[in-house]
Amino acid sequence: MIFFAFSPDGAEAQSLRGSRTVQAQQNRQADRENLTAIKDLAQLRRFVRAGLLVRLPNDKNIVVDPRLDGRYRYCRPWTRDWLSALGRAYRKEFPKSDPLVVTSAVRTAAYQGSLRGRNGNAAPTTGLRASAHLRGSTIDITKKDLSGRELTWLRNYVRLFKAQNRGIVIEEFRQAVFHVMVFKPVPKKKK
């Protein structure tokens, strides 16, 4: 069993809150990583063919919400690696539980624009507050249907991930999800 020690008060308790500042941080990080915002489905398909985007894991540990359109079931390779590792750790901790569910991944600017029309929580398509989903390194994992123990475990897992400066995590409440941007790994220096 894995336990993480976090104080329920102070900055750590607030660390998963979203804000305009956090949205800007996501976009600055994506710019540092040279991640292009995906404009349309043609560009998305080119990224898939080039291996810049890969299929989301969909196995006994992580499943994709069946409502997510198949055209948007992609992410950056390092995001997939992180999701797979998360799924394995979750399965080890909760072998009899249902798998974790990914509800959202890559989006095109056109798709994000349509979301804004029906979802007041959806980020814009341009500017410092633009949706990080446009870059392909961001996914949403639902909290819905998790037991209290499972939710606490997942919250602690993503807090540790964030504390290790491996990504940005926002716990959303309008949509019951963890919004996770996974940073591109820095290549290790050869000795």
Image (tube, rainbow, N blue to C red):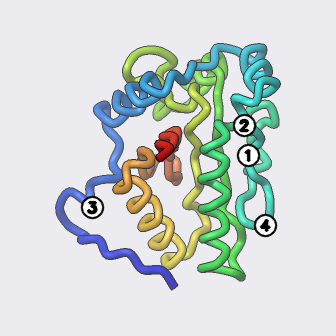
- Where 95 sits versus 38, above or below? below
| Residue 98 in picture, x, y percent from top left | 71, 71
The answer to which quarter of the image holds residue 20 is top left
Compare marks 3 and 1 and give the one earlier in the sequence: 3
Query: How would you rate the neighbour count of disc 4 (Cα within 10 Å): few for under 14, some for 14-19, many for 20 or more?
Result: few
Amino acid type, callout 4: Lys
Q: CA distance from mark 1 to mark 4?
A: 13 Å
- Taking depth in this image into account, of 149 and 11 the one nearest to the observer is 11
Amino acid type, callout 2: Tyr
Circle 2/circle 1 CB separation < 8 Å? yes
Amino acid type, callout 3: Ala
Element class at badge 1? loop
Circle 4/circle 3 CB separation < 8 Å? no
Element class at badge 2? strand
Q: Residue at x 44, y 64 (%)?
A: 155
Q: Residue at x 33, y 48 (%)?
A: 17
Q: CA distance from mark 2 to mark 4?
A: 18 Å
Query: How would you rate the neighbour count of disc 1 (Cα within 10 Å): few for under 14, some for 14-19, many for 20 or more?
Result: many
Residue annotated with mark 3 = 13
Residue annotated with mark 1 = 56
Compare marks 2 and 4 and give the one earlier in the sequence: 4
For the question of whether residue 181 can be seen, the reply is no
Residue annotated with mark 2 = 74
Residue annotated with mark 4 = 60
Q: CA distance from mark 4 to mark 3?
A: 31 Å
Q: Residue at x 72, y 65 (%)?
A: 61
